[in-house]
Amino acid sequence: MTPTVAAIIPAAGSGSRMKLDHPKQYHQLAGTPILIHTIRAFYHHPAIGRTVVVVPAEWLEKTREMLAEHGLSGDTLTVVAGGQRRQDSVMAGLRVLDHDTEVVLVHDGARPLVSADLITRSAKAVHKHGAAIAAVPVKDTLKRGDKTCRITATIDRNNLWQAQTPQGAKLSLLFSAFETAGEMDVTDEAMLLEHAGIPVMLVEGEETNLKITRPEDLPLAESIMQQKTAPEFRIGHGFDAHRLVEGRKLVLGGVTIPYERGLAGHSDADVLTHALCDALLGALGAGDIGRHFPDNDASFANIYSILLLDKVMELVSERGFRIGNIDITIICQKPKLASFLLDMKEILAKSCRTDSSAVNLKATTTEKMGYTGRGEGISCHAVVLLVK
Ligand SMILES: Nc1ccn([C@@H]2O[C@H](COP(=O)(O)OP(=O)(O)OP(=O)(O)O)[C@@H](O)[C@H]2O)c(=O)n1
Ligand SMILES: C[C@](O)(CO)[C@H](O)COP(=O)(O)O
């Protein structure tokens, strides 16, 4: 997507239906003004090159201070005064855009819950079709009522949509729609475009993208905001065991340990690192180490398993996760591992892009019971918590 997408955020209304002593866009939602949430969604979005916020003239200074307080600044963010009607405010925003702006997305300041995905999809639809708006299909049966609240008709809801924002168009189309409309009153940009005969596409919006309009919308928005900002956790467990044989190096947690035997395997047979890779893949729901690094692939022969862990961690990062903590238990009768645990921790923490305090290593014996107790092999359990 080109960087010539601009966002206009009309926020110059009085919010009369909210019945507050200040415009609703300055009201706190989850401890932050509603307008700041909305601006952040566009200011931090990679497809948006410029954001213009339109506010009541008497709130210009206060808004600029508020933006600075929240670390929102720079040439890509402009604040201007709005007009009497929403469409006048949008026009005030349009006037300050650079002429090379290709696409404009207009988004209500009072819709702070818009997702990055909806912004992306709206911008893409405008690039493709020239004009598009977010909207959700009408779910309920629609009634028309008269002044006495008596039903006068049931309206067929087929093909009916509730308009949301973002509402976007190529800049030239939006300007010409404004010109055609003259002084006509509209409630959204789509209405202007429709009036000018410009086709407008519908992009599936989000039920959570609500416009805070009435007092009862606030608690609902609070709970949606809490869910959006709640961290996502994933837990994973890994287990591995390898046989101890003559003529192999013993590598555990990336550290070579002096011992008369080593672990047998296709790679360096680092049982600890393998258990950890499996725990990470498990937490991601991405299968296991055998699927990612098959033991019939010659390129993994004798490979240092920390390199495999590096690759697994690339997957973890690509999916937006980081390590919460790691807990590992090595089951090994001999040799004694205590003096190597610190080095292992450092190597594992580096590969896992985390602090060594997030990695806990424990070594235990099975009191000479079972295959590990008899010294036939070493096994390992790993548990990880991933956080997004
Ligand atoms: N002259 C206006 C009127 C509205 N808006 C903005 O348009 C968006 C959608 O309008 P609405 O929710 O109706 O806001 P208000 O007009 O402020 O609310 P009310 O009708 O209750 O007074 C809001 O972000 C609002 O601030 C604007 O920029 N300029
Ligand atoms: C543009 C809009 O958000 C689409 O739903 C809406 O029409 C503007 O607000 P209003 O409450 O209708 O004035």
Image (cartoon, helix red, strand yellow):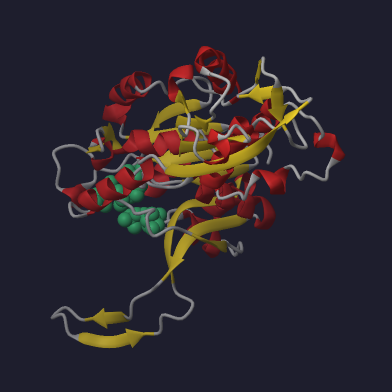
Q: Can residue 186 be seen in this snapshot?
A: no
Q: Can residue 76 be seen in this snapshot?
A: yes
| Left or right of residue 51: residue 4 | right
- Residue in the image at 47% along x and 38% along y: 383
- Residue in the image at 84% along x and 35% along y: 299
> Picture coordinates of residue 62 (x, y %)?
28, 23
In this orientation, which residue lies closer to the viewer: 89 or 298? Answer: 298
88 shown above or below 317: below
| Left or right of residue 217: residue 185 | right
371 shown above or below 128: above
Quarter containing the N terminus: top right
When asked about the image quadrant of residue 274, the answer is top right
| Left or right of residue 26: residue 113 | right
> Picture coordinates of residue 124 (x, y %)?
63, 50
> Picture coordinates of residue 280 (x, y %)?
55, 39
> Picture coordinates of residue 175 (x, y %)?
57, 47
When asked about the image quadrant of residue 183, the answer is bottom left
201 shown above or below 378: below
Quadrant of the picture in which ligand 2 is shown: bottom left
- Residue in the image at 60% along x and 56% along y: 131
- Residue in the image at 33% along x and 39% along y: 12
In this orientation, which residue lies closer to the viewer: 333 or 362? Answer: 333
| Left or right of residue 58: residue 40 | right
The number of numbered badges drawn on the structure is: 0
